[in-house]
Image: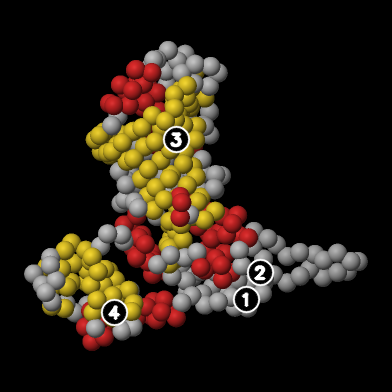
């Protein structure tokens, strides 16, 4: 049964005086478990994108892994159900961005949405650009921008900024693993740099672009930003929001990836039914496994992902477990379309 969207009101049918409006249909939520890689479009906050997909899947529980500004597009892993237990892994992962830095113009927000503060001539050479980019490669410190979601006393910095307040912020240590110059246009009406940035978590690309412009003596702001990788997840595996909206419900569910998508590169341990049951109860299991900081643990019969653990001196010690209900629902697979 087709339901109305979250922003759609009841429709008044055509056909004459006194026609009664159609009743609003309530969306019935259901347990959905897995990871959906969304290519977030421009213009939406990460939470707005999440809420749209959550509604499309009729999911009970959902979260995202790392905020993208409305100005930015690209990889946004969305976690549903039991996958939310492992979202921190992607929050901590390195990211890769492609960005355009407009030179010669400083803005209030360090991006294209802010009011222009200053316009300066661009007189730097390509050699100077390369030298400055080298200086910003490796461990650096950044002062978080006022127009950011970072909180001070429980209130986001952008709320203070909108009220005209400038709050003191401590510099943060981040790492720029690689800073590649894709294109440079240093003359004309819109001088700019196109960059590919591989960086650690917590890096503000807006601040990086602004700081590069300052180091070049002409100022700058971020004109475009696209996240192309987060950890091992790339745009190649993403689905767009329009494509998702055009799908039938079972096709949308087929876009969900297993929870383990968030946990690449971990060794795998399988347990028999008795050991699997005790492991899910938090009881340590003994075996001939080598020490490991984190492993994926599966039940052998039935074949099911149970959670993560670490191995120390032959003991398998649970770290983060799925509930028996989550496991049963995953084994059953997400339900097909049901009447709402």
Secondary structure of the residue carrying numbered label 3: strand
Look at discs 3 and 2 and give the one toward the viewer: 3
Residue at 70%, 62% in the rendered image: 9
Q: Where residue 99 sits: x, y (%)? A: 44, 35
Q: Where residue 56 sits: x, y (%)? A: 57, 64
Query: What residue is shown with label 3?
Result: 99
Count of numbered marks: 4
Q: Where residue 58 sits: x, y (%)? A: 55, 69
Image quarter (top left, top right, bottom left or bottom right) of the C terminus: bottom right
Look at discs 2 and 4 and give the one toward the viewer: 4
Residue 299 image label: 4
Residue 3 image label: 2
Image quarter (top left, top right, bottom left or bottom right) of the N terminus: bottom right
Q: Is residue 160 visible?
A: no
| Callout 1 crowding tier (Cα within 10 Å): few <14, some 14–19, many ≥20 | few
Residue at 24%, 35% in the rendered image: 139
| Callout 3 crowding tier (Cα within 10 Å): few <14, some 14–19, many ≥20 | many
| Callout 2 crowding tier (Cα within 10 Å): few <14, some 14–19, many ≥20 | some
In the rendered image of this protein, does residue 140 appear above or below residue 292? Answer: above
Look at discs 1 and 4 and give the one toward the viewer: 4
**Mark 2 or mark 4, earlier in chain:** 2
Residue 337 location, quadrant: bottom right
Q: CA distance from mark 1 to mark 3?
A: 42 Å
Residue at 44%, 24% in the rendered image: 184
Query: What residue is shown with label 1?
Result: 340
Q: Which is nearer the eye, 160 or 84? A: 84
């Amino acid at each position: 049964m087709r339901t109305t969207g979250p922003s759609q009101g009841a429709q008044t049918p055509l056909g004459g005086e006194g026609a009664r409006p159609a009743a609003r249909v309530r969306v019935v939520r259901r347990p959905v478990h897995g990871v959906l890689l969304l290519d977030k479009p421009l213009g939406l906050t990460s939470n707005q994108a999440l809420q749209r997909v959550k509604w499309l899947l009729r999911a009970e529980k959902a979260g995202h892994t790392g905020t993208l500004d409305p100005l930015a597009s690209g990889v946004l892993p969305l976690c549903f159900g039991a996958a939310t237990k492992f979202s921190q892994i992607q929050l901590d992962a390195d990211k890769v961005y492609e960005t355009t830095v407009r030179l010669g113009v400083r803005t209030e927000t360090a991006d294209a949405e802010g009011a222009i503060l200053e316009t300066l001539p661009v007189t730097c050479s390509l050699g100077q650009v390369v030298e400055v980019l080298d200086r910003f490669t490796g461990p650096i410190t950044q002062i978080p921008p006022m127009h950011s979601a970072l909180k001070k006393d429980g209130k986001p910095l952008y709320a203070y900024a909108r009220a005209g307040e400038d709050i003191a912020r401590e510099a943060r240590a981040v790492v720029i693993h690689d800073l590649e110059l894709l294109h440079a246009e240093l003359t004309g009406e819109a001088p700019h740099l196109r960059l590919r940035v591989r960086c650690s978590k917590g890096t503000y690309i807006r601040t990086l672009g602004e700081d590069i412009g300052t180091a070049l003596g002409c100022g700058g702001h971020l004109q475009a930003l696209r996240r192309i990788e987060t950890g091992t997840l790339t745009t190649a595996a993403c689905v767009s929001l329009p494509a998702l909206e055009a799908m039938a419900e079972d096709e949308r569910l087929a876009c969900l990836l297993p929870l383990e998508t968030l946990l690449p590169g971990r060794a795998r341990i399988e347990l028999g039914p008795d050991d699997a049951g005790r492991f899910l109860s938090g009881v340590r299991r003994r075996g001939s496994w080598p020490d490991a900081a984190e492993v994926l643990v599966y039940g052998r019969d039935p074949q099911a992902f149970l959670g993560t653990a670490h191995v120390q001196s032959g003991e398998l010690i649970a770290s983060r477990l799925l509930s028996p209900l989550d496991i049963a629902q995953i084994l059953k697979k997400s339900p097909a379309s049901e009447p709402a």
